[in-house]
Amino acid sequence: MTTTPGPLNILYVAWGFAPHRGPGTYRALATVNALVSEGHRVTVLTADLANFDVVTGADRSLMDAIDPAVNVVRVGFPVGRRDPIVSRWDKDRAHTPPAWRDRMTARELAVFPEAVYALWKQRADAAAYRMHRQDPFDLVIGTGNPYVDFSPAFHLGVEFGVPFILDDRDSWLLDVYTGEQLDADGPSEALWESMQRRCLEAWFVNEPIADWYRKRFPDLAHKVRVVENGWDGAYLTEARGQKVADPAAPVFGFVGTMSKGMPLELVLDAWRIARPRLGPNAELRFYGQLGHAGFGEMSQVSLLDRNKPYGVKHLGRWPKTEIDHAYGQLDVLIFAKEGGSMVTSAKIYEYVATGRPIVTVADSSVDSWRVMRGYPRTHQPRSMTPKDLAETFVAAWQDAREADPGKIAQALEIGERLERRNQLLPALRAVVEAVRA
Amino acid sequence: MTAASPLVPGLDVMIVWVDAPPPPSAVEELQDAVGRVPVVLPLVPVVGVRGSAAAMARRTRQRSRAFVVRSSRKVAKGLVSVRGGTRVARVVVRMGGTATRRTGTHAPVTVLRANVPAEGPVLIVATDTRAASALWEVTHDEPRVVGVMGIPAAARLVQTVAAAGVPWEEWVDVAGDADPDHVYTALPSLVDGTILAPHDLRAGSGGPVALGAPPKLPKTRTPRTRTQPSLLVGPSNYAGMGAAWARAAGTHPGVQATNMHVVKAETPYAFAADHPVTTVEWPLDAVRRRLAEEAVGPATHVLLESMRPIVDAAGGANGGWDFEAGARDVEALLASGRTVGLLFHGSESRRPARHAELYPHSPFAGALDKPAVASLVKATDTVHGLLESRFGDLPRFVSTPDMLDFVPGATWLPNVVRHDAFDPGTPLLSGRLPVVLHAPSSALMKGSDVVDDVLGALHKDGVIEYRRLKDVPPSVVADHVRAADLVVDQVHLGNIGVLALEAMACGRVVLGHAIASVLARYEEEVPLVVIDPTTLRDRLLALLADTDEVHALGKAGPEFVRRHHDGRRSADVLAGFLGLS
């Protein structure tokens, strides 16, 4: 029962907040915007702008998506091993990189069990303490990765009894692609267990991950909640409808980060087989950067380059704010994803929201299938061979050309339910109620 | 030939590689970002003639290390086509001297030096670590040359500096700063001449602070008089005690008390504080100015910990552990009209030679010239020298009773445990094996090598379950303590530290070293199992054989800690310092 009806003062810790362009940014944006729309006061604790502008890459347009009511506090991130400015490196780093890396890792792990980001811990904690002293928080939400985001939440919880949420999304302790536990019995597991023991709730993006945690820490199972990802209504508008296909110029496309494990070669092999049946103007477009850090494998670059004569275009990293335009150009979407039952992919929500035909190049165990359940325009190859996949491309193109209004309406309706705000709000409201109680 | 970048006028841009030739799309990316064609330079030329320039170009594209330098007299040129048939990148290698007449390879740095434009600002991008190594050498010889690892980062850097409207040369000056963060934290805010972004809380709650102004301590403010004192404790906050004492002092009506904490940026040990700042930010004038205003400003009384500087008011501190700077801050605080007390925790004032006299198993005995101990000797000599020569009249406090033997004339200000430290742990001896915990903050001081040997052997023999913690954050240690039956704190130091008190508070049995004269200062029985390196094993086994004693000690602990360390005794001591009693 609500005993304090006033707005809560909430700290949201997200190293990767706008203008960071990583996939986790959109969940963070949606969460804080949803909280202020519910009337709460929200402060985001994130890294400094220069870190994103220079070191990791930024999409400044994302800052326009931050509700003006959100207070954003930026605390400098020690770039450490990611410092790209060679002039500033010390001699050891320049001359003995492996040994330097080992020492750097040791330094980082001595502070917090997460390489690269650990050195932000003390600064973020200090800022959180200071803000709490000035204007005490009622709730803290830390979203990982990076998991150092959990540190201020945990410490405000321990030191001052502030309730906190661990939004663990893709899981600290698991390699969701293999299902294997990372750092078993190591410091991250020990720290996580302490954190989960003290948190109000621990959130995950899908049931298979949540189940793993329930089984691993059975006495803490009651704290586990699934808060799925979704598509963002702010970025996907015009593309949510039927594109009238030009019979002479089919456009297929993949939208998203092209990770190392993505079955790119299979897709391209199939494309070359299918293209003669799709027409000489058929295009296969890839919107997205190569690799999560934007550094692609040479093999990927080479594959894409070699297939240019077959209408293959790599358009590089595509700003989220222009994602609507990208989807709007495509007749058929290709969902190519590695991984197994613990992998959902945030992109699949956007795919489904468009109502377009989707060719799925993924293992049948991938959790993305659950999101696509009931979606009438999914096209799955009989086997993961170039020949069968080529047949599926042709079938999906046929679907795009037929443009059955009934199917389209049904597809869009399924997509509608998966908007991120609809996924987040029930969880956020429940937490607010628990805090007030 | 190099290409000038219109985005940053006059800037020459090159891409260098040894193992990883830049993919065409990456070269295009940099080209698009800076607006002109970058020079692509392989740093490992293969000397010898292998055909025409066109053939060289093909080899360059197909085999990463293949390039040709014909002779010292003739400049070898290869053309790399990165956009279909369009010539957008030009590879030029100029080598001089007789070296190029020989067949073989040249050191990448030699090739690079021979090709860096003779003057003007240059941005050179390395695409692999070996190229970066060569690039590092050149950038250290030539400050006008900025080296960057990775083409995307280089593109972002040029764009960011240009967007900030900062002249490239000015930015290069910042980049040369020794502070690893400065170049990044300064970038977005160079435009308005401030060092801190508007929402950057490192320096406090307000807006940007101007560069270049050292902290100045404000005079004490009325009406905070002796009847309404305001206390600041800082900057050490070891084990969170600064904050705990502030809370204790704040229990007196009308007293406001806060603590500040200059915490190492790279440590797992961190404790809550009212004015926390890391050692990375503390040296910034702007940060210390804000601390002077926000933390020191309201204070009528300052309890300065460990003779460490709090704001380095006089400037010139060699880091946050510069005791001379701490002494200068004490003088500045006194000059500003404040009452100052000095608080000593231990390591900064526990003279090793004195310890070796008092404690038969002292880790310092016979080791005074070892580097780790010698540095302690030096530090404690400095602190005591300052204390006696300049601050003999100031009130002085120590946090543990053993320290009274090291700081003459001091008053014991008891450590304070957290209120939730009294939450009970698991029932004693309820597991399959007794769980014995050791969680040292310093292995040398706690005698962890002995503890590890003894408890490790007992663990191996199946007598106990030994849990050894290392670099575990304090907020997690409490969970481990509650899950243990016994805690071995230290075997030769002789103090009863915060971990020992927290363990007692939740009903654990604590083993540690102490001498009778120190225990007597509690004026009651201390529920501590006294051990030393020679008795740890036997005393532990005897204890495990006597479960009644275990339970009696476990029961006695919480009440003992409550009587001495729940904050009330500390508040009384501080009342004297604050003039309340």
Image (tube, coloured by chain):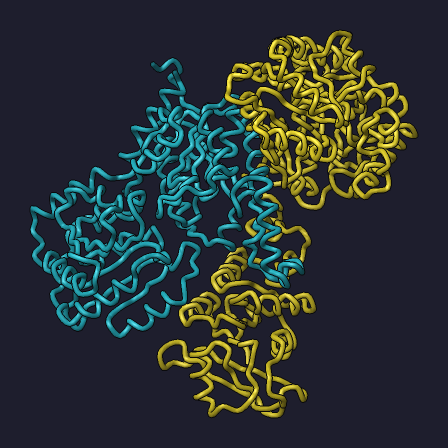
Q: Position of residue B152 (x, y in %)?
A: 47, 62
| Vertical arrangement, residue A187 with respect to residue B483, above or below | below
User: Which residue is pictured at 41% across the width and 62% down the height?
Assistant: A296
| Vertical arrangement, residue B223 with respect to residue B169, above or below | above
Q: Residue furthest front?
A: B461
| Residue B340 appears in the rendering | no
Horizontally, is B430 left or right of B271 in the view? left
Q: Residue furthest right?
A: B389
User: Which residue is pictured at 41% across the width and 80% down the height?
Assistant: B81
| Closer to the camera in the image, B115 or B291 | B115
Q: Position of residue B53 (x, y in %)?
A: 47, 89
Q: Position of residue B14 (x, y in %)?
A: 54, 72
| Closer to the camera in the image, B433 or A44 | B433
Q: Quadrant of residue A286?
A: bottom left
Image quarter of the C terminus of chain A: top left
| Vertical arrangement, residue B105 with respect to residue B290, above or below | below
Horizontally, is B293 left or right of B368 in the view? left
| Residue B467 appears in the rendering | yes
Q: Position of residue B137 (x, y in %)?
A: 66, 68
| Vertical arrangement, residue B64 with respect to residue B539, above or below | below
Which chain can be seen in cyan?
A
User: Which residue is pictured at 29% across the width and 38% down the height?
Assistant: A420
Image quarter of the N terminus of chain A: top left
| Colour of chain B as rendered | yellow
Horizontally, is B522 left or right of B392 in the view? left
Q: Quadrant of residue B466?
A: top right
